[in-house]
Amino acid sequence: MAIRSACAVVFPFDLFGNAGTGAGAQLLADVLQEAIDDTALETQPTRPQAYTKSLTIEEFPFETLHDVSQWRDTGRAAVRAARTEADFTLWLAGNHLGVLPLYEELGPDALVIQFDAHLDCYDLHDTTPELSHGNWLLHAQSALPKIVNVGHRDLFLKPKAIRNTFAAVFPAEELMTNMSEVLAQLRQLTAHAKQVWFDLDTDVLDPAFAPAVHQATPFGLTPQQLLSIMLALWSDRVVGVSVSEFDPGRDDRDRTLQLLGWLLERLLLRQAEASGKPSR
Ligand SMILES: [Mn+2]
């Protein structure tokens, strides 16, 4: 089995909303580094060996004024470098705004399945007109990918405002009542995409399972729903996964950390193991 390479980019940008989430990106990178180190020490054959040798981790700090002012250019260059070096990219962002350079770089040929409680194209009275974590989808400098939201709980936007930004949206309540139909529609959408990206804003999950977020919204997805959708839609056209909005300072006994860490390891295995099933 050919080992496919993966690059994890740590992009702990968390300005303009939900400061503290940068530390979440760094903590998830620590989980991956621990998986690499532990696997290297293991003398028995284990499943993580399928990805740990070909996984690299690269961090972009935001510690100086220069780092911060260049964040969008740095982000786009980081996406390009990761996608040139590896078959698969993990993008560990601070707040959700930290995936904007990624979306711009993916461009209109890609399909993004975006798991988010919110539809980040808000233009309401309490949203700042400047770029923020709540309106970043309105601030792209180049053509965005086709975006499909899964799991939102928005109660504000009218269908026309949603259609301007999203190719399709599947609110969480639709998943609860009609999961198989939603999956069928998602399968059809992904079947026609050249490249598929999964973008996970941690707040898509119900706060009962993932409390470490700033905009905790009830009636969210269960971890089981999230994993089953991701695995059902997985194919070799899935080129990457991003995670954002995890603030460890708001976590409860590391529940969110454990959940996201396990999920990342599971998805790396899925990407590395040809069949996606554990070898026997
Ligand atoms: Mn959100």
Image (tube, rainbow, N blue to C red):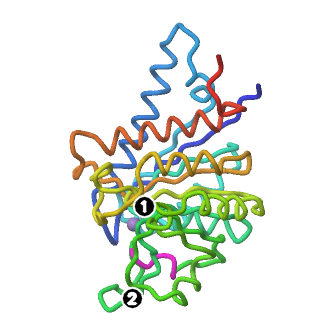
* Residue 99 numbered tag: none
User: Which is the main secondary structure of the residues drawn in magenta?
Assistant: helix
Q: Quadrant of residue 135?
A: bottom left
Residue occupying the point 52% across, 64% down: 150
Instruction: Name the kind of residue labelled 2 in the image.
Output: Pro
In percent of width and height, residue 196 lies at 67, 57
Q: How far from the left and from the top, in percent, is residue 41?
A: 48, 13
Q: Secondary structure at mark 1?
A: helix
83 lies left or right of 179? right
Q: Which residue is mark 2?
A: 129
Q: Which residue is mark 1?
A: 67
The span shown in magenta is 134-138
Label 2, secondary structure: give it.
Answer: loop
The 10 Å Cα crowd at callout 2, few under 14, some 14 to 19, many 20 or more, is: few
Of all residues, the one furthest to the front in this rendering is 177
What amino acid is at disc 1? Asp
| Quarter of image, res 153 | bottom left
- The residue mark sitting in front, 2 or 1, is 2
Q: Compute the Cα span from label 2 to label 1.
A: 24 Å
Give the percent coordinates (x, y) of residue 207. Answer: 29, 56
The image quadrant where one finds ligand 1 is: bottom left
The residue at the point 38 percent across, 80 percent down is 155
